[in-house]
Image: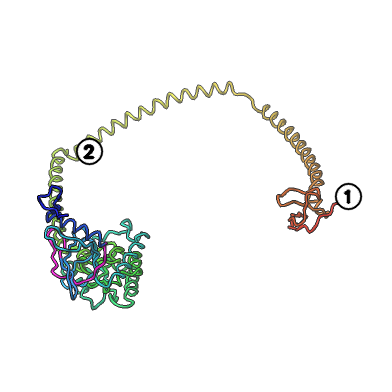
Amino acid sequence: MHAPTDADPAYTAPPVLTVTALNQQVARLLERSFPLVWIGGEISNFTRASSGHWYFTLKDDAAQVRAVMFRSRAQMAGFVPREGDKVEVRALVTLYGARGDYQINVEAMRRAGVGQLYEAFLRLKEKLAAQGLFDQERKRALPLFPRTIGIVTSPQAAALRDVLTALRRRAPHVRVILYPAPVQGQFAADKIAEAITTASRRAEADVLLVCRGGGSIEDLWCFNEECVARAIAACSIPVISGVGHETDFTIADFAADMRAATPTAAAELAATPRADWIGSLSADAMDLRRAMRRTLSDASQGLDSLGRRLLSPSDRIGHQRLRLLSLATAMGHAVQQPLNRQGLVLAQLRQRWARHRPDIRAVRAQLLSDQRHLNASLCSQVKGRRDALAALAAQLELLNPQRTLERGYAIVRDAKGQVLRDPAAIHARDTLTVRLAGGSAEVGVAHVQTVLE
């Protein structure tokens, strides 16, 4: 036996892989060997590309790994990580073939330690969405000209200063009412819900801002409580939620009629700048003045045209008086002639009627006599019918079963309502209905005794 050599015809050289093929096989091997897994670490070298993809390094005290999160996944993260942030990522282990670098492909990201909170957030969001609290149909439009704006936040919050500064700059004429409530810590959610309910009950404001500055998910958690969402949904006035920064989303944002990225943005949504309204009113006033000038000009020209066509009032009255006299004379003749003709015709008809008028006195006497005979006949017939009816009523009374029951007899019915006449149809433990003269009773049968003839 000898080892095959290159010159041996039976020798087959091993396949030669390209670098690309090698990296592709290694990538497939890694992806098959490592399923999606949660990895915790610290963000380092974070870069947000113009394409929207995120590139960063995930590290701990002893090691690091390159990571990529593509745009479609990054948009669902809910926040933009910063250098040094502690996060947990759900990733697929893979290989970047172009450089041959081992890396992880991130599918989801959350802040470290908030996994349970985030899951609770998703569960509550799904529950309230199923109940219709987030439906667009129940969202109300914001008032166009609010005169009073209510604010639910902490008096010490920086968000309050930002909102007041924005409102003072944009709409200094708007009245502001503060409904104080803590925006962080234990029982903060109950206090926020109570403040929203108070604002709704008092109905002093045209729109209500629920706001707080940015923070971690733990800091903002009071705005993820169910009581706050239900208070916002039940509020009688439109609600704008301005909680956290642009990437922070809370349950309150979904329940509100309008979500603002920041507290300052909430103030800007609530009140349009006064300068804009004044400018719009000035433009409208200018248009109105132009329209009035055109209207007055047209009316003036029309008045001049009518003035040229107008006759002297005295001449016009003289013409109208002569025409009125002529019409009165013609109307008198027109009315009198038909009256004269009709008078002659009426006189002729009266003469003819007098000749042919019948004597109705004899007919009236005969009619009275017939009426008396008819009344007498009707009275006689009614009396006879009444006597016959009384006789039939007496016979019917004799046959009335109630009279028989009053003499001590009874009617027995089975459970189906059938009248029983034979004891053979009755069985022990049957329930029977016995009707007596004064009512009925339900009786049970202990035993049945048949009388033999």
Tell me the chief SS of the magenta region: strand
* Residue for badge 1: 452
- As rendered, which of 387 and 251 lies closer to the eye? 251
Q: Is 200 part of what is drawn in magenta?
A: no
Question: Label 2: how many residues lie within 10 Å, few (<14), some (14-19) or many (20+)?
Answer: few
Q: Earlier in the sequence, mark 2 or mark 1?
A: 2
Q: Which residues are magenta?
A: 35-55
Figure quadrant of residue 232: bottom left
Q: Residue at x 16, y 39 (%)?
A: 310
- Judging from the image, what secondary structure is the residue with disc 1 in? loop
Q: In the displayed structure, does residue 352 sit left or right of residue 323?
A: right
x and y percentages locating residue 168 in the rendered image: 17, 70
Q: Amino acid at mark 1?
A: Leu
Q: Is 39 part of what is drawn in magenta?
A: yes
Q: Residue at x 30, y 72 (%)?
A: 222
Mark drawn on residue 317: 2
x and y percentages locating residue 230 in the rendered image: 35, 66
